[in-house]
Image (spheres, rainbow, N blue to C red):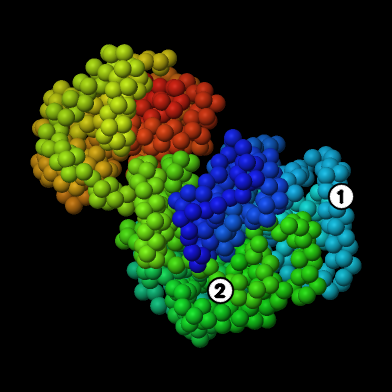
Amino acid sequence: MTTLSSTGSVPRAVADAVGPGGSVSTRALDRVAVAADASHFLLTPQAVVVADDAATVGRVLRAAAASGAHVTFRSGGTSLSGQAGTDGILVDTRRAFTRIEVLDDGARVRVQPGATVRQVNARLRRHGRRLGPDPASEVACTVGGVVSNNSSGMACGTAENSYATLESLVLVLPSGTVVDTGAPDADAALRAAEPDLVEGLDRLRRRVTGNPDSVDRIRRAFAMKNTMGYGVNAFLDHATPAQLLAHLVVGSEGTLAFVAEAVFRTVPLRPHTATALAVFPDLEAATSALPDLVATGAATLELMDATSLRVGQAQADPPAALVGLDVTTEAALLVEYQSDTPDELDTMTAAGSRAIAALPLLRPAPLLADAAHRATAWKLRKGLYAAVAGARPRGTTALLEDVVVPVPALAATCAALQDLFERHGYRDGVIFGHAKDGNVHFMLTDRFETDEQRGRLAAFTEDLVDLVLGAGGNLKAEHGTGRAMAPFVRRQYGDELYDVMRSLKRLVDPEGILSPGVVLDDDPEAHLRNFKLAEPVEAEVDRCVECGYCEPVCPSKDLTLTPRQRIVTRRAAARAAADGDTALLRELDRDYEYAGVQTCAVDGMCQTACPVLINTGDLVKRLRGQARQPALDTAWTAAAGSWGAVTRGASAALTLAGRLPSAPVTAATDLARAVLGADTVPRHTPDLPPGGSARRRLGDSVGSGPDAPVAVYLPACVNTMFGPEGSGPEGAGVGVTAAFALLAERAGVRLVVPPGADGLCCGTPWASKGHDAGRATMAARVVDALRAASDDGRLPVVTDASSCTEGFRQTLAESGVEVEDAVRFTARVLLPRLDVAPYLATLTLHPTCSSARLGLDDDLTTVARAVADEVTVPDAWGCCAFAGDRGMLHPELTASATAREAAEVRALGGEAHASCNRTCEIGMTRATGAPYRHVLELLEEATRG
């Protein structure tokens, strides 16, 4: 592990090269935040550059070469072999390089390196296509890494990996030259700009193709998955300069060029699938079954050992095949068949079922086409690395390796791996992977801190290299060579091809500025340095393995920090404290307050993506509670005791502010914010609505009909504080509370309103700010009131803001009272009883973070489709980060969180816009300029008759 200095540095020429569209920082917090990737290595950069285009990258590289500085590119940070870390200059390409352009009705796609695989596939899905590479980390890994690591995955093998499906690249070479290998004149332009490079590539190509031993070694190595060393198979497959260069860059891990853009040939989506989870007595039985299953045409055969299964059992909603299983030595194969047509799937499933029936399984393993069954199985598999690593002993580091052998040798190799685990004392070693390709991953956990621990790893690695190469395999299959296997490239390829690779590196990067130590390293102990030590910090986040799956869904990712970065910064602060570096600790703590605490939306979206279900917002809430001012804490506790008056007062204040000239009101709040703090006083802006109506106006019930009430209706207090959207081309709204009451009346359904509803709240305002005493006061009142109103849980409680639904569920979790969102209640109970006349051609829908966490989005879409012919959820949808009052405390957070979705919404030009939470509607209205209303308001208008 490198020692972190509180001061970084960057050559003046590099800083000047960045220009006005990018940024450069040497601040400790910024350097710490991007230091960690998903691997077991940790190097902290001297400076972080955020580049906004290929020209900027070119200027930075020219300046770095002139200054003797080293540069590493980073995007998704899901790398597992250390290739995304550096102690030089790190160029962050995640934020600006996100453009996706679908070509030829989806047959091709042009993508920039910061877009994730999932984002690209979401755009391609409507065309029935997808990217060929299908890595398990698709939610977070980006196209830049997919190209640079020659990513493959679970189904693509070598036929549909990055190398095989690549059409062209836009590259920035270390010299600063920008090359479009797909341009009609690409070869001539490259020859004119880089004549020595073109001549050198041809010389190397002739050297390789003229050596029969080299050709034979390459053919054998690349017949399987292979990301060890450089992709020298390109010398056999391509002769023209531009295509040869492009395919050499694939898998080069950022050491030859920056990938500014890639064009891929896409593959069919194969929408029809059948999936089974087959559980075997042991790993040998599972691997021995592979030949018969491969022969049936299975698209995927994912292997999981006993430890993997035990971790899977502990997850929420485990696959049915694992429920109640006493796992000791068992192993499993996730078997899936994919086809273009139902008839083809039937044929494949029949053959697969016969093969599965003949296997020595512990339980029946039916092949099912059920989407929920499939989702549960794949959720286990795709989150397996992080979930298994998350279950490691506290304070240890997870090391994941990735090897491939010929499929006939897989069973023996797995058995030998288990022997190596035992021999070297890694008794918690885990094996899983893509068995169909002979590609297995295995994980070790240790502290990797002492000489004994590092020596043990060194001995294990030597034995591993002998095992894999002795079986005719490759030391890296799909995770890249990185730093983990760089010292062993010569051993796999021999002296001649290793020298070819060294010559290629010198030719393309003569100054050696790009990621030294990655892919090639002559130091035999390089893989034993710079280990990441996972310092224990807080119980809420200690099991984090820094995989980065949380980052794409985080609303603050482009403004300050992501959940992973919040955690790694806390770990860096713990290391600084342990080292006695008080200056660094003070700096990190000071800058963390805004970046880590104040601008966290605590929306919980990170938990929806985290394989080990970490909600970083829980940590942030506790940190806010620890930093709370006693006077504010007392005020919030008092507010809990008179919440009805507080909400009515807030409503009146908003109404009054709306009647006054906006400039003085905004200036007054700005002054208060300057004195009392931006995280204490909300900022008033002219776009805020007037106050809403008090809930007590509803009386003791809503709806109609002779039957007994079917539920309790508790409107959310947020609809009292903020009135409905009341202007714009979509007309004035009545608000969701009035709309729901009218819908219940028209449906002939009655709901009771609890006495004292004005004084009840879900508790989120207190929980999000860390005011525990006030939250407890409100929770006690809510539990008592709703137990009584619901007849001790006989009736469900319905509320009409998705974040409040989530808050009430948490408050009432132990009370026996069920809470249901008004959207789901409407879809389930009211909608079938209503006469609906759709009146909108197009509706743009914004689900909320709470609706996603609650699983409401299907119901939200159902209601929306009842009022509109076409309903669109933007591809760039995400949490708006208004988060109660957070969008008024820190408007910049909502502006950043909504920027991409807002641009897409404006381009869509929908006739109407809807959501299911009042503050989210305000946030989206502010971001897009289009009025957003609750979807139930639109349904009310469609049922007026």
Residue 31, visible in the rendered structure: yes
The residues bearing labels 1 and 2 have C-alpha atoms spaced at a distance of 39 Å
Query: Between 380 and 587, which is closer to the camera in this rendering?
Result: 587
* Label number found at residue 756: none
Residue 33, visible in the rendered structure: no
Q: What element carries label 1?
A: helix
- In the rendered image, the residue lying farthest to the bottom is 423
**Residue drawn 59% across the image and 69% down it:** 484
Q: Name the residue under label 2.
A: 528
Pinpoint residue 542: horizontal percent, then vertical percent. Answer: 36, 62
Pinpoint residue 384: horizontal percent, then vertical percent. Answer: 47, 63
Q: Against 115, is 760 above or below?
A: above
Q: Against 65, is 714 above or below?
A: above
Pinpoint residue 775: horizontal percent, then vertical percent. Answer: 18, 44
Q: Mark 1 points at which residue?
A: 195
On the picture, is 224 further left or further right than 440?
Answer: right
Name the quadrant containing residue 638.
top left
**Residue drawn 83% across the image and 53% down it:** 197
**Residue drawn 80% across the image and 66% down it:** 500
Q: Against 519, is 703 above or below?
A: above
